[in-house]
Amino acid sequence: MAMQEDDFSQKALLSQLDISADLSHEFSSQAAYYAHWAYAHARAQDLVRQLEEKADLLFSRLYQEYRTDNSGAKENDCKAFIRQDRQFKAVQKRLRRARYNADVLKAGVRAFEMRRDMLIQLGAQFRAEQDASAMAPAKSKRQSEKRRDGTARRVSDKLKRQARRRR
C-alpha cells in the first residue's frame, strides 16, 4: 500500500507521545504505538524512493527530448529546460514534501524510543515505591502516588517541549 504525502497527523503523533498517570495503560500501549509509527516511517521512506525514481525517469525523458529537438544544446541548457518543466517541478515539490514527512516520522520514531526508555525508568521507580510503601504507613502510600503522577506529568511535559523544539 503506497503512502500518500499527508498520510499521518503530527497532532496524533504528539498526542500519543504523552505519558498519562495510568502507567499500566502506557506500558501496554507503547509497543503498538511504536510499531504504528515505525511502519508509517517505513512507508514514508518508500514514497520518497518512489518519487526519486519518478523524478529520475522524468529527468531522463525530458533530457532526451530536449537533446533530440536541439542537437547543438549544451548540458546547462538541457538542465535549465528540465528545471522549468511543469511536470518536473510538480514531482520535485511532492518529493520535498515526502522527504519532510519522512523526517518528521523519523523524529517521531526516535521520540517513541525515548518514551520507551522513560517508561522503563518510571516502571523501576514505581516498583521501588511499591516496595517502600509496603513497609510504610498508608500516608506514605498516598505521597508516593502523588509523586508518581507528578513524575509522569513532568515526563509528558518534557516530551512535548522536545517535540515542539523539533518543529
Image (cartoon, rainbow, N blue to C red):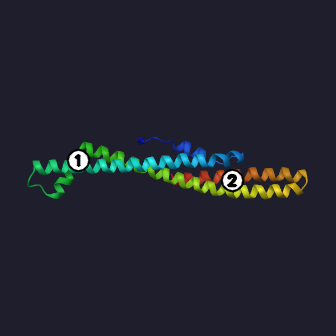
Residue at image point 76% right, 55% down: 126
Q: Which mark is residue 119?
A: none
Q: Please state, as top left, top right, bottom left or bottom right, where the N terminus lies in the image.
A: top left
- Element under disc 1: helix
- Element under disc 2: helix
Q: Which mark is residue 154?
A: 2
Amino acid type assigned to the residue bearing label 2 in the image:
Arg
Q: Is residue 5 left or right of residue 26?
A: left
Q: Is residue 55 left or right of residue 137?
A: left
Q: Is residue 28 left or right of residue 83?
A: right
The x and y percentages for residue 75 are 16, 58
Q: Residues within 10 Å of mark 2 (few under 14, many from 20)?
A: few
Q: Name the foreground residue: 59 vs 31.
A: 31
Residue at image point 83% right, 57% down: 131
Residue wearing tag 1 = 84
Amino acid type assigned to the residue bearing label 1 in the image:
Gln
Residue at image point 70% right, 51% down: 152
Mark closest to the chain's N terminus, 2 or 1: 1
* Residue 74, quarter of picture: bottom left
